[in-house]
Structures are given as structure tokens and as C-alpha cells.
């Protein structure tokens, strides 16, 4: 189940990933745009890890643990595609989070391309979505580099500006126009 790109190794999550998950998801810097903020207790990381492992068990795919090919024992992030609630609708979501030490090296773009390829070619899904906070320019840049286009907004965080919804489809590699989507998020 291990996947490789030119610089990355990705594999399904394991229980041994708990410390790395807590280090990355508990870091204030990696959660700058996360309205929920960083994880505070290891129990929160355990719940998240258990949910992700359960997703793998139920669906046969999910988020990956990511390391560099030059240091395969050092976890630098987590990401890939998995089902996520977009309001009342569950959709295939592209997501990623990397340790600060891995920022600025193009890893999120490389992982995202691999995840979309996996979704379209192996899972044979017709479309993939992503949610991003409007102020997160770096993540928006990654989504646009991999061919995703902003198609809507989702009011997913009470009291804050809505998140941007990005989308791409297998046939053209780019998103349809907003009025071509079967789903509308702005009312949620």
C-alpha cells in the first residue's frame, strides 16, 4: 500500500503515528488557519488517528502518513483523499498538513498531485473537492497548482467567513463552472 512520488513516501496510517500526528496537529503554526486551533491533548490526536484508521478499514483508502524518500522514518506530514462532510453532504476531500520543517519545498503540491491521481485512476472517482480558509494563501496556491478551481463557499465555521470550496473533475482536470455543479454549498 506504500506509494511514492519523486521525493515522498506515503503509506496508510498506523497506531505508531500517534506522536507524529500530535506533534504536527498540535503545533500552533500548522494550525494558523484552522478555526479549531491546534490539538491540546494527546487524546484528541488518538481520536483523530482512530477515525482515520477506521476510514481505511471501512473504505479501503484514506489519508496517508507522509515521509521524504531520503528519511523514510521521519514523518513530515499527513494527507491524501478521504470522505469529509461538506455541510450535509459527504464528498471526497483532498487534504494535507505538513510539519513546519517541510514547508516551502513543494511537498503539499507533490502529495496533492499524487492524491488526485490516486483518486481518479485507482479509486475511479469522477471528482474531488477541497475546503480552504480564505486567508490561507499558500494552500489556495497549492490547490490551484494542481488544477482545482474555486467553485463555491461553505459556511462551515459559525461566526467566521465561509470556507472556499475547490473542485476538480477527472475528465478535464479542471472544475466545471459553478452553475454546472449539482451541489450548492452557500446555503449550508
Image (spheres, rainbow, N blue to C red):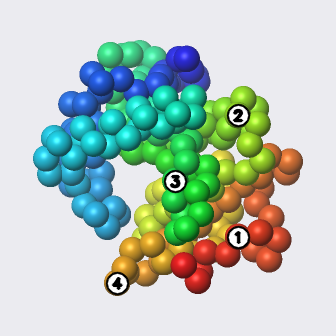
**CA gap, disc 2 and disc 4:** 36 Å
* Front residue of 36 and 150: 36
| Sequence-earlier tag: 1 or 4 | 4
For marks 4 and 3, give the CA distance.
21 Å
Residue at 25% x, 31% y: name it. Answer: 18
Q: Name the residue under label 4.
A: 159
Give coordinates of residue 30: x percent, y percent. Answer: 30, 51
Q: Furthest-right residue in view?
A: 171
Q: Which residue is drawn at 73% across and 51% down?
A: 127
Q: Do labels 3 and 1 touch, CB within 8 Å? A: no
Left or right? Give the position of 155 relative to 151: left
Q: Which percent across, then down, holds residue 141?
A: 55, 57
SS class, disc 4: loop
Across and down, in percent, residue 144 comes to: 63, 57
Disc 2 to disc 1, how far (Cα)?
21 Å
Q: Which of 110 and 65 is in front in this view?
A: 65
Amino acid at each position: 500500500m506504500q506509494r511514492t512520488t519523486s521525493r515522498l513516501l506515503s503509506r496508510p496510517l498506523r497506531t505508531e503515528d500517534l506522536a507524529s500526528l500530535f506533534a504536527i496537529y498540535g503545533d500552533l503554526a500548522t494550525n494558523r488557519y484552522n478555526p479549531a486551533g491546534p490539538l491540546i491533548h494527546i487524546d484528541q490526536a488518538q481520536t483523530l488517528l482512530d477515525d482515520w484508521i477506521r476510514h481505511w478499514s471501512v473504505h479501503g483508502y484514506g489519508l496517508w502518513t507522509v515521509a521524504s524518500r531520503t528519511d523514510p522514518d521521519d514523518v513530515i506530514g499527513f494527507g491524501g483523499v478521504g470522505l469529509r462532510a461538506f455541510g450535509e453532504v459527504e464528498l471526497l476531500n483532498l487534504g494535507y498538513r505538513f510539519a513546519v520543517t517541510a514547508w516551502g519545498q513543494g511537498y503539499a503540491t507533490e502529495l496533492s498531485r499524487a492524491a488526485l491521481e490516486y483518486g481518479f485512476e485507482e479509486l475511479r472517482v469522477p471528482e474531488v473537492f477541497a475546503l480552504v480558509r480564505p486567508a490561507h494563501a499558500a494552500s489556495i496556491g497549492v490547490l490551484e497548482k494542481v488544477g482545482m478551481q474555486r467553485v463555491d463557499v461553505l459556511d462551515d465555521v459559525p461566526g467566521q467567513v465561509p470556507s472556499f470550496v475547490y473542485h476538480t473533475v477527472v475528465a478535464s482536470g479542471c472544475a466545471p463552472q459553478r452553475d454546472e455543479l449539482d451541489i450548492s454549498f452557500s446555503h449550508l
